[in-house]
């Protein structure tokens, strides 16, 4: 039943709200961060029925909750619910991290893009600066990563999507940040990229966008925002194209959580041990 939850009054309370949410690894990740940093808190996953986000948020705040993560399909609802938003949240039109200040005002940020960039550049040593970057898809997940991506100063960004108009619209929104344009998948033929990021959810359904061969430059890196119990079909495709690195979104998941934790608690946890624990757990 949606919104049927309670908090632990003895500690600070946090949660992730979504639908579905039972699969979420956020409670495990934040509990590990809390243990590592000596923070006393309780973090739970809360299932919210469609159309029920506003009431669930009101209840969580009324009961004394300190902050929350928001996952699909409520990130835009969370964006609307905030009185104060960071620049990256404003541009992403989505909030995945929310907290309350002393007078009850709601603050929102999106940590997905910074989590992706930290996993790529810090954890895996992937260079974005001065590189040609291809992004597959033009939905909310892609919109959420574009601002932090441009902070890394790529040479050129191409958004490819089945529906060209959506890619063109998104490219237009971020055209002030740098060199960006849109194209169809077929129009990628003959182009080569140093970094390819899959922002479609198709790989979870066993599909890969219809990409022409030969689009990876030498030593190219491929990153799938999705993750699964085994290689996604995009990761399999990347390996078949001899990508130098083919990575899934587990690291991004932990890094975006670490950024949320820092926003709430003012302490930055170590992510490497948590990422490794999730990978080991997945391989069992």
Image (tube, grey):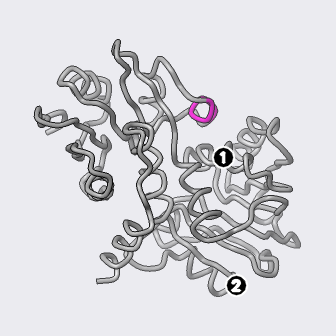
Q: Quadrant of the N terminus?
A: top left
| Crowd class of label 1 (few under 14; some 14 to 19; many from 20; radius 10 Å) | some
Stretch of the chain drawn in magenta: 87-91
Disc 2 vs disc 1: which is toward the camera?
1
Say if 245 sits above or below 10 in the image: below
Q: Secondary structure at mark 1?
A: helix
The residue labelled by disc 2 is 241
Say if 181 sits above or below 226 in the image: above
Closer to us: 250 or 48:
250
Q: Where is residue 198, by image quadrant?
A: bottom right
| Crowd class of label 2 (few under 14; some 14 to 19; many from 20; radius 10 Å) | some
Closer to us: 185 or 179:
179
The residue labelled by disc 1 is 148
Cα separation, mark 2 vs mark 1, equals: 27 Å
Q: Are marks 2 and 1 in contact (CB under 8 Å)?
A: no
Where in the figure is residue 165, as x and y percent of width and height? 73, 43
Where in the figure is residue 207, as x and y percent of width and height? 54, 71
Q: Is residue 191 left or right of residue 164?
A: right
User: What residue lies at 42% left-to-right and 39% top-to-bottom?
Assistant: 266
Q: Examine the rendering and report whether any part of residue 5 can be seen.
A: no
Whether residue 280 is in magenta: the answer is: no
Where in the figure is residue 183, as x and y percent of width and height? 80, 55
* Sequence-first disc among 2 and 1: 1
Q: Examine the rendering and report whether any part of residue 146 can be seen.
A: yes
User: What residue lies at 69% left-to-right and 73% top-to-bottom?
Assistant: 221
Q: Is residue 135 left or right of residue 176?
A: left
User: What residue lies at 56% left-to-right and 62% top-to-bottom?
Assistant: 119
Say if 114 sits above or below 271 in the image: above
Q: Quadrant of the C terminus?
A: bottom left
Closer to us: 257 or 91:
257
């Amino acid at each position: 039943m949606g919104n049927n939850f309670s908090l632990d009054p003895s500690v600070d309370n946090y949660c992730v709200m979504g639908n579905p949410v039972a699969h979420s690894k956020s409670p495990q990740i934040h509990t590990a961060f809390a243990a590592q940093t000596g923070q006393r808190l309780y973090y739970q996953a809360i299932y919210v029925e469609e159309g029920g986000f506003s009431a669930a948020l009101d209840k969580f705040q009324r009961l004394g909750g300190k902050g929350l993560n928001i996952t699909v399909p409520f990130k835009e609802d969370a964006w609307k619910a905030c009185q104060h938003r960071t620049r990256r949240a404003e541009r992403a039109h989505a909030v995945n991290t929310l907290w309350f200040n002393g007078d009850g005002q709601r603050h929102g940020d999106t940590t997905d893009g910074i989590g992706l960039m930290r996993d790529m550049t810090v954890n895996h040593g992937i260079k974005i600066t001065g590189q040609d970057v291809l992004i597959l898809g033009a939905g909310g997940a892609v919109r959420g990563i574009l601002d932090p991506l441009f902070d890394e100063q790529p040479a050129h960004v191409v958004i490819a999507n089945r529906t060209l108009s959506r890619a063109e619209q998104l490219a237009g929104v971020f055209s002030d940040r740098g060199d960006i344009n849109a194209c169809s998948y077929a129009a990628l033929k003959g182009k080569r990229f140093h970094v390819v990021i899959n922002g479609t959810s198709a790989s979870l359904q066993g599909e890969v966008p219809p990409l022409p061969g030969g689009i990876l430059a030498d030593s190219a890196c491929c990153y799938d925002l999705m993750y699964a119990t085994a290689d996604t079909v995009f990761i399999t495709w990347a390996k078949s194209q001899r990508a130098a690195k083919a990575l899934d979104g587990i690291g991004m998941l932990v890094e975006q959580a670490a950024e949320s934790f820092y926003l709430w608690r003012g302490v930055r946890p170590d992510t490497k041990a948590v990422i490794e624990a999730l990978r080991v757990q997945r391989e069992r």
